[in-house]
Amino acid sequence: MKITTFFLLALWLCALQGTNTTREQALESLANAERDFSATSQAEGLHQAFVAYMADDGLVFAPAPTNGKKLHATAPPSTALLTWYPAYADISSSLDWGFTTGPYQLKATPTDDKIVGAGFYLSVWRKQPDGQWKVAIDMGNSFSPNLLKTETYKPAAPGASSISKGTQENLLAKDVQKVQPYDAETIIYRHEEYPHKYKNGTIEPAASITYTNLGHELSPAEDMAYTYGSYTHNVGEKAEKGHYLKVWKMLDGQWKLAAHNLVPDRK
């Protein structure tokens, strides 16, 4: 009996290790897709990279949500060098849907030393039928190049709690509510600021922002999602208008924000 119990325990541990390895491999393949995306931008140009790595229905913000593949396919040639790398990534339990985020920098030409633009990107990826990762939606938030710093890649650890599914109805209701369901680890992106976790910084008063949802997508496992739309931020007598991208994750049976990105529209 003891031998049988030990044997079954060994099989269970092997199965658990196999599951963890599968998730780790899938998460690394997602991060590598992001790295390859940036390498293509450096080797072939930013427009060519976006055409190659955006999903056919993938969205970018210009400043309104726009088909990214079509936008970059018809853009005039550019000599600018846009590069980036993932600092963090997380993946759905289905292993075919996830997001990456990290710093980017822009130079006028590949040979320039001066960085003329910088910020943090937030990209949601979905795996295609052929097994390739493609970008479903992408939003960058900018800040001064002097705020750039080197980030060490730290992928999300496996969740400690059991995986649960969320509903579309509940997601959309939470998306537009005044008090957003932040988690301590929610990544906050704001214009001209370096991103920070909710637990480590401050944000604007909840009542000052009105959200209008324009679209969403749930992962196949329904444990992660993104929402996007327009917002109005009332600051005294001024009203800042822009667009948002939020990434959501089911935590303790509730939709919570993994990332909250607000980008004011360019004037």
Image (cartoon, rainbow, N blue to C red):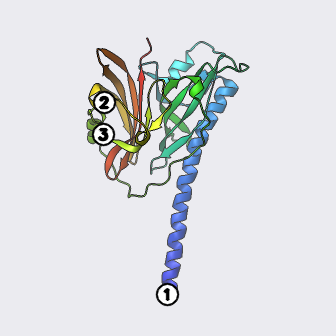
Q: Is residue 107 left or right of residue 58?
A: right
Q: Amino acid at mark 3?
A: Leu
The image shows residue 22 at horizontal and vertical percentages of 55, 56
Residue 162 coordinates in the image, percent (x, y): 38, 58
Q: Which mark is residue 205?
A: 2
Question: For the residues marked 1 and 2, what is the alpha-carbon distance in whole angstroms?
Answer: 60 Å
Label 1: which secondary element: helix
The percent position of residue 108, horizontal first and vertical second, equals 65, 16
- Which amino acid type is shown beneath numbered disc 2? Pro
Which comes before the other along the chain, label 2 or label 3? 3
* Quarter of the figure with the C terminus: top left
93 is higher (above) or lower (below) than 201: below
Question: Which of the 4 image quarters holds residue 45?
Answer: top right
Q: Residues within 10 Å of mark 1 (few under 14, many from 20)?
A: few
Q: Is 158 located above or below residue 98 in the figure?
A: below
Left or right, 114 with respect to 225, comes to: right
Is residue 86 in sight in this rendering? yes
Q: Find disc 3 in the rendering and name its residue.
A: 171
Element carrying mark 3: helix
Quarter-wise, where is residue 230 in the image? top left
Q: Which residue is mark 1?
A: 2
The answer to whether the residues at label 1 and label 3 have Cβ atoms under 8 Å apart is no
Kindly report which numbered mark, 2 or 3, lies closer to the viewer in this rendering.
Answer: 2
